[in-house]
Image: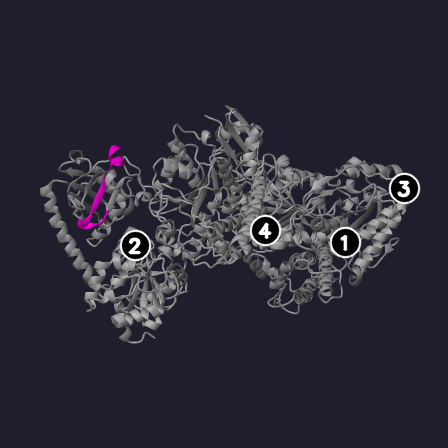
Amino acid sequence: MAKKERTPEESSRDEAAIRLLEHACAIEVETAFTRADAIAACNIGSQGLCCKNCSMGPCRLVGKTVRGVCGATIATVAARNFARAVAAGASAHSDHGRGLAYTLLEAAEGKAPDYVVRDPVKLNEMARYLGVKTADRSIEEIAKDVALASLTEFGKVEGTVSYLKRAPVKRQKIWQEQGIEPRSIDREIVEMLHRTHIGNDQDAEHILDQALRCALGDGWGGSMLATDLSDVLFGTPAPVRSGANLGILNNNKVNIVVHGHEPTLSEMIVAASLDPELIEYARSKGADGIQLSGICCTANETLMRQGVPLAGNFLQQELAILTGAVEAMVVDIQCIMQGIVPVAERYHTEIITTSPKVKITGATHIEFEEHRALEIAKEIVRRAIDHFPERGEMIVPDVQASVVPGFSHEYITYALGGFYRGSLRPLNDAIAAGRIRGVVANIGCNNARVCHDELFRYVATEFLKNDVLLVETGCGAIASAKQGYMTPEAALEVAGPGLREVCETVGIPPVLHLGSCVDNSRILTVLAQMATEGGLGQDIADIPAVGMAPEWMSEKAISIATYCVASGAYVIMGGSTGPVSGSEEVLHILSEVWESKIGGRLEFVVEGEEIVRRSLEHIDKKRAALGLPEYDASKWGKSGDWRMPELLELPFEKQIEAVYGVNR
Amino acid sequence: MSRYIATRAIRGSNALVAEAEALLKQAVEEKGADTPVAFPNTAYFLPVTFGMLAHEVNTLGDLEFSLAHAKKLLHPLPEDNLWVPYLGETLDSGMATLLAAEAIEGVRFAYGEEPTLYPGLELAGSTSYPQLNGTGHLNGPIDDIQLRSWGIQLVDGRMPGFAALVGAAHSNEAAVAIVRELQRRNILTFLCGNTNGRSVIDQLHEEGVEMGYDTYIVPFGTDTISAIYPLGFATRSALTFGGLKAGQWRDILIYNKFRVFAFVLALGEVDDLKYAAAAGAISYGFPTIADTVIPEILPTGVTRYEHVISMPWNEIEAETEEERAAKMVQRAIEVRGVKVKITEVPVPVAYGSAFEGEVVRRADMRAEFGGKNSRAFEYLLMAPMDEVEDGKIELIGPGLDTLDEGGSMDLALVVEVAGRKMQEDFEPVLERQFHYFINGASGIQHIGQRDITWIRISKAAAEKGFDLKHFGDILYARFHADFGAIVDKLQIKIITDPDLHAEWLAKAREAYDFRNRRLADLTDDAVDTFYSCILCQSFAPTHVCVVSPQRLGLCGAYNWLDCKASYEINPTGPNQPIQKGQCLDDDKGYFAGVNEYAKMASQGTVEEVTMYSIMENPMTACGCFECIVMVIPEANGVMVVSREDPSMTPAGMTFSTLAGIAGGGLQTPGIMGVGKFYLTSPKFVSADGGFKRIVWMSSFLKETMAEEFKQVAEREGDPDLIAKIADETICTDVEGLLAYLESVGHPALTMDMMF
Amino acid sequence: MEKVVLDVPTLWADHHVLKVREALLPLEGVKDVYASSAWKKVLVSYDPGKVNVAALEKALADANYPVGEGKMPMLVQPTEKRRDPAWAEMAYRVTETNRVDLEMSGEFRRY
């Protein structure tokens, strides 16, 4: 079924994107948006009913066909497809983590001189969990052992993934009882692929148990290591001020966009872009300087730590090039559309692939090597500068929002009590009292088949109105950043009265940016800490919280959703009926069966209204189960600075008595 | 934090740290880095700095480390727009402020500028400053002696916490009313700061409110910097009673959040430094309540309930200043979550434990009973149910109106008690309460007990309508409220009629005599039940007192009979019967039941405990002991230091320092904290040789317990024994001690070796 | 009798209030002083026949509280993007609930 072509306004809710889509239409450039309109999604595959695991097929289990050639049932096929997506997603995050571990190892051994341990305290914290001795040892020695211990996690011979013990005790027990503790990160991915081979595991529930285990190896293994290792190498994020959306591209500077998922190279490019020599070189080419910006999670990584502004999220990668203002787009891994190459061919923009894992036909490949990282970064920046004089017409929409990101879980506890009293107690208290109704993790990708950012914007607005605190990562976070919800002022303008009180007390935006998509592990850490802090039950499943990916599209999102469910969360995947909609049985397992076994459930919901309705219902249900007071917005909103402006305006003589208030 | 407050607090902290740095630099230049810095009579150096950083400040030079740390805690101001979070940053700045403020007070001490002089002010109990030669002065920091003597009251909840009043109240009436409201609830009132140069201290002084330790009102200083003293007090509470060590900053702060019920009343306009200091207090879990318009911080978490409350004085709905004060204090107490039980006592004067220490001087006296010119006594006896008419209060004989101003007459307070659970043994326990109950009335002074009772009524109290029958009202209300579990009915006779007085006095004396004999018979061997006291576990979680007839609690407040009565009053309370069980060692006092209980109640920290030995598994102590007994090996004996004694001892440590070793619920052979009346017990370290082992004793004890010790000396068969015991006026080192013991022939020198 | 309001930026705490009052009150002709550390201002009621604003300002300047001059010292200045040097310095990296918080938070005053 060929679909009707959408107008730019129907394709995106983002003003900058709309402007550039109009432009693309005018100059007849193809984008993911138009291709989504042109290509109908395979109706059988999209329901999870196509099995192509062997050459007896592919078998399409539709109509009267209820078994494949080998006899596999609809449930088996749907479950296998789902499970393979989990394995692929988990492999992506985990391989990213492994890469960072090797970087740390090389840094510790002095083979990568451009990298140092920037956060030794966090290194010690990691060492504690990984059983690495720290007393009387140099940072390099510890770093080396932490790197080696991290690498061991991927192929552990015995035992289970070490970071599992960061979860609440009750959660660990559930994993034990269900037999889904990942033994090592790689092993569960391999076993997942093995089990879904032709003629192997053919019981949907059993296949999906392994999917849970495989995903846990991602969330509490690969991803969590990736986050921690990044923090050790590049610093643990704390709030910074920056900007978001294509308007940050600078008409007069050399624009370099980093895109992908790893901070390893992009951190070097940040350093290179500050190099006085290169800035001078840029000037010599007629530019005012070098403007770095980011797309996708590389953007989030550099934003959190260095304040590098966001150019946009996943669906804006082609649009950034369409501005004509980008000299180079430097990409590493994951979520890089091949479509950027043909777009770039129409401009002076050079697409530079850097990862040994990623080459794209038509792009320049400059392979990144840790031992001469900065040198390569400088070479890339220099190339970008060389393109500056080739610029043609530019259309940079004057659209950007301010953003205050940088909420590592460590900073969140610090923000709530300072060095001496940091804890999550104020957050738990606020939820228990009802100032904050609950917490929603609003995360995930963009999807060209869903109106760009529409669901993100809608649910964020609704949740804030309802005093729900939002924590975000990935492209969802970029959506909220562009919406202006990641500013502290937003708390005063869009948040409900209770949430506003809390935000005003702490000085935080109502939507917290926790980082890239591997940084969903930060959300797990916060949830675990909330559970152990007390007052909200003893397990992640007890907390009035919901996870969601309203515009998801990648296999990584499936893995994330699965490990969140395995950790006890209620997760909603939005925008479509989901990859297993063809099997009632699998849908039942993902929701009802999983909930009874592990406390979390996974649902697929198309509409934003329904996502919000189900989330609030779940939050209120959990509140009631904890015996917390019913959510009542009318009780809150009295604290804050609101009385002060009036007093400040009075002449001094009047102030003297006016401080005692109005006489009654 | 609100951004308004955060901005000001962060600004104030930056400024104060800068000021402290400049001040210190100047001081080091002028006086040298080695100039000593010390707060008077404390083992905790500068207590906040010591508690948070485990840094001992002894000299000006030592302060540099404190300020360097404070600087690390500073932050830039929140921006006007697109600000980054400020709560954690503000709380850090608050802590920096405290370190800087304490450093400034340290420098002031080095210069002799502390305590603040205040000519004309006479404090009813204060930290002592001999160098001032009696010049009027504010208190400065509370010393360890007072901290410990308030210990048991803080522990058992009689003294729920403290309020730090910073600034000046809206009017003098308001100041007095607020303080009275706090006193009524036995909340310690700490005063500091000023508004436009006027301090709440000035206001209370002008209104003739008596200040000092005895009235629970402590004036620290007239600026906000002196607000560091209340926080030093809080820090030391955690170190003293909580068994925490310096440097356990998180434990100390959380301890205060949950166990020290304190709050700040910001009176008058709030400036940058006051915001900064309030931020410091919030880290301790202490909220701030202001009587002016300031931003409120209502979400909870760092403190237990709201962080900052604004109650603009003119907006409090009330007719009078008193009502406003009552509402404000009430709100403050709710916000802090202080549990306060007030017994409404129907008398025309203010009532509360804070008035217990009040002194009625002869010149202010309306009348007195007992003392030199008349005889007063009190007697409580058990009576059959049907012979007691509950609430009957009779005045038999002439009333107060027949007495001239300053006159004196005989008085008897006879209370007849009936109750299903009442026992004859409880008579003295209840009778001893008269002292506390009657003293609680403002303007009434009660001294002594039994037939040496001495009561004074002040003119002010009499003018307000206080009459003799009000003694009955007080006793009636308090006995029902506090001892309702054993007292079902009581009637009270207030006797001034001479004949009846004489008749009852004879009966009473017979009873006193009987009780004395009963007490003498009441030995550890004669009973099969001891009592535990774990009241102090709220502060020292592993400490267990075992109270036997011949060894009272180390705080001196609970003897065996008290515990027995307490158990009757509250069977699930802190005093539980312990079956002695099999006696494992008669001499040292090992009992199977006691061991078992101690192990259980100390959560396994204490495995075994002896009742009569200091050398082997001695009993643990919390922090509120009256004296410390410590072995002096060279002298083959022990010394006894009382907490009132600030001097050096032959052990080379003062009481304050020793207390750090003796307290905290840990067994340390050779040192223990005891109640002073245990010294007179035949079971006093009897396994190690008993009373004759005492080779050194604070002169304070010798003086205040002269009578009791005389009897003990006779019992020990050496009537001159007390004179043979050295004290701080004789020697404060081992060499001097040995020389003295030799010269007087102290028996310890010839006794068996202790080791 | 006249009144004048003077801005004193370095009057930021109540120990400065005491000093400011000390500087002004002894001047002949000064009737009343309201020194406010909250607003960093001083309201002086004075007899213009005996003292003038210049004299008041001089007295304040001599006491190190110059009118309209100086500011509160800020030891820490914001940086362009990351404003907070203390974050790296104090190194607060906690990933689990503090044991102390849990142990001490129970109901303790049982009696």
| Mark-to-mark CA distance, 1 and 2 | 70 Å
What residue would you read off at disc 2?
A: B557
In-image side of A459 versus A433 (left or right): right
Please state which of the two labelled residues, at mark 2 or mark 4, is closer to the viewer.
4
What residue would you read off at disc 1?
A: A271
Where residue A216 appears, as percent x and y from the top left, is 65, 58
User: Which quadrant of the structure image shows residue A495?
Assistant: top right
| Mark-to-mark CA distance, 1 and 3 | 28 Å
Question: Which disc, if any, is residue B71?
Answer: 4
In-image side of B353 versus A249 (left or right): left
Q: Earlier in the sequence, mark 2 or mark 4?
A: 4
Which segment did they paint magenta? B447-465
What residue would you read off at disc 3?
A: A392
| Mark-to-mark CA distance, 2 and 3 | 91 Å
Tell me the crowding category of disc 2: few under 14, some 14 to 19, or many 20 or more residues within 10 angstroms, Cα based: some
User: Which quadrant of the structure image shows residue A380?
Assistant: bottom right
Tell me the crowding category of disc 1: few under 14, some 14 to 19, or many 20 or more residues within 10 angstroms, Cα based: some
Q: Are marks 4 and 3 on the same chain?
A: no
Question: Is B464 in the magenta?
Answer: yes
Q: Are marks 1 and 3 on the same chain?
A: yes
Viewer-proximal residue among B467 and B381: B467
* SS at mark 3 in the image: loop
| Mark-to-mark CA distance, 2 and 4 | 46 Å
Please state which of the two labelled residues, at mark 4 or mark 3, is closer to the viewer.
4
Q: Earlier in the sequence, mark 1 or mark 3?
A: 1
Chain designation of label 3: A
User: Which quadrant of the structure image shows residue A241?
Assistant: top right
Chain designation of label 4: B
Tell me the crowding category of disc 4: few under 14, some 14 to 19, or many 20 or more residues within 10 angstroms, Cα based: many
Q: Are marks 2 and 4 in contact (CB under 8 Å)?
A: no
Mark 2: amino acid: Ala
| Mark-to-mark CA distance, 4 and 1 | 29 Å
